[in-house]
Image (cartoon, rainbow, N blue to C red):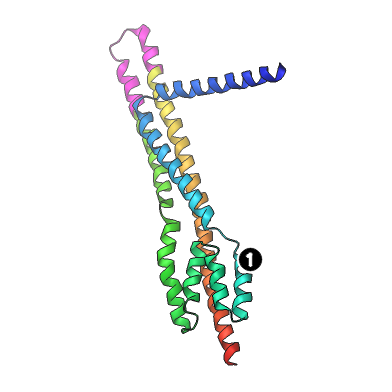
C-alpha cells in the first residue's frame, strides 16, 4: 500500500510539473513557439549526431596494435580485413591507404587524404548548426521579452486603474517566460555544440594520427623487406 501511495504521489508531482510548464508556455505568448521549434531542431540534431559519432568511435590503440601485427608480418590483406571487419570512418580511410601498400609513400598518403575528404564531412556535418540555433534561441527569447514589455506598458495606457496591475503582470509574465525559455534552449544548444564539437575534433585528431602511423608502418615494412 505504501509503495502504491509513493507511486501515486510521484505521478501527481509529475503532472503538477507538466501543468506548470504548460501554463508557463501559454503565458509566454507567441514568442514561445519559435523557441520551441528551435528546441525541437536542436534535440533532433543532437540525437542524430550522437548516434553517428558513437558509431564512428573506435579503440585507436587496439586497432593500431592489430594493424602493426599484420603489417609487420607482411600480411597486408590481413590488415585490410581488420579494417573491413570494423567499419568506421577511420578504418575506411586506413583501408584506402592499405589498398595501395605496394605504391610509393606519396600515393599512399594521397589515397588516405582522398578517403578523408569523403569520410570527414559526414562526421562534421550539422554540428556547427547547434551554435547558431543556440544564439537564435537566445535572440528569439529576447524578442519575446521586448514584445511582452511593449504589450505590458502599451496595454495599461488609458485603461481603468483597477485593471492596470493585471495587464501589467500579464505582459511582464510573457516577457519573463520568453526570456527563460529562450535562455534554457540557448544553453542546451551551445552546451551540446561544445560537447559534440569536442567529440568530433577528437575523431579528427585520431584519424590524423592513425594516417601517420599507418604510413610509417608501411614504410618500415618495405624497408625491412628490401633490407
Residue at 43% across / 75% down in the picture? Answer: 111
Answer with the quarter of the image where residue 16 lies: top right
Residue drawn at x 47%, y 35% is 184
On screen, residue 227 above or below 196: below
Percent x, y of residue 156: 32, 15
Residue 93 in view of the camera: yes
Residue position marked by numbered label 1 in the rendering: 62
Most frequent secondary structure within the magenta stretch: helix
How many numbered dots are placed on residues in this image?
1
Q: Which residues are magenta?
A: 147-169
Task: Name the residue located 63 percent from the left edge and 66 percent from the top edge.
Answer: 62
Question: Measured along the vertical axis of the image, is residue 181 above or below residue 164?
Answer: below
Residue visible at 36% across and 9% down in the picture:
163
Q: Nearer the viewer, residue 1 or 149?
A: 1
Q: Nearer the viewer, residue 217 or 145?
A: 217
Tell me if residue 28 comes above or below residue 36 in the rendering: above
**Is residue 164 one of those drawn in magenta?**
yes
Give coordinates of residue 125: x percent, y percent.
Answer: 41, 55
Q: Which quadrant, please, contains the C terminus?
A: bottom right
Please state the horizontal and vertical placement of residue 158, each as a whole percent of the image: 28, 12
Q: Secondary structure at mark 1?
A: helix
Q: Is residue 198 visible?
A: no
Residue 215 inside the magenta-drawn segment? no
Of all residues shown, which one is farthest toward the right? 2
Amino acid at each position: 500500500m505504501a509503495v502504491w501511495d509513493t507511486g501515486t504521489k510521484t505521478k501527481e508531482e509529475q503532472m503538477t510539473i507538466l501543468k506548470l510548464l504548460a501554463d508557463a508556455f501559454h503565458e509566454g505568448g507567441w514568442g514561445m513557439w519559435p523557441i520551441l521549434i528551435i528546441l525541437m531542431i536542436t534535440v533532433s540534431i543532437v540525437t542524430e549526431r550522437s548516434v553517428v559519432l558513437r558509431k564512428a568511435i573506435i579503440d585507436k590503440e587496439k586497432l593500431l596494435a592489430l594493424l602493426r601485427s599484420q603489417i609487420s608480418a607482411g600480411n597486408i590483406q590481413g590488415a585490410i580485413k581488420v579494417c573491413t571487419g570494423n567499419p568506421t570512418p577511420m578504418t575506411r580511410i586506413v583501408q584506402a591507404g592499405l589498398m595501395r601498400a605496394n605504391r610509393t609513400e606519396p600515393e599512399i598518403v594521397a589515397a588516405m587524404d582522398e578517403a578523408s575528404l569523403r569520410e570527414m564531412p559526414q562526421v562534421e556535418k550539422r554540428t556547427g548548426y547547434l551554435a547558431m540555433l543556440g544564439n537564435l534561441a537566445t535572440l528569439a527569447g529576447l524578442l519575446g521579452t521586448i514584445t511582452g514589455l511593449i504589450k505590458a506598458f502599451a496595454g495599461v495606457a488609458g485603461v481603468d486603474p483597477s485593471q492596470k496591475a493585471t495587464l501589467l503582470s500579464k505582459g511582464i509574465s510573457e516577457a519573463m517566460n520568453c526570456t527563460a525559455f529562450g535562455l534554457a534552449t540557448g544553453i542546451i544548444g551551445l552546451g551540446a555544440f561544445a560537447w559534440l564539437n569536442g567529440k568530433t575534433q577528437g575523431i579528427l585528431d585520431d584519424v590524423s594520427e592513425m594516417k601517420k602511423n599507418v604510413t610509417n608502418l608501411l614504410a618500415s615494412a618495405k624497408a625491412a623487406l628490401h633490407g
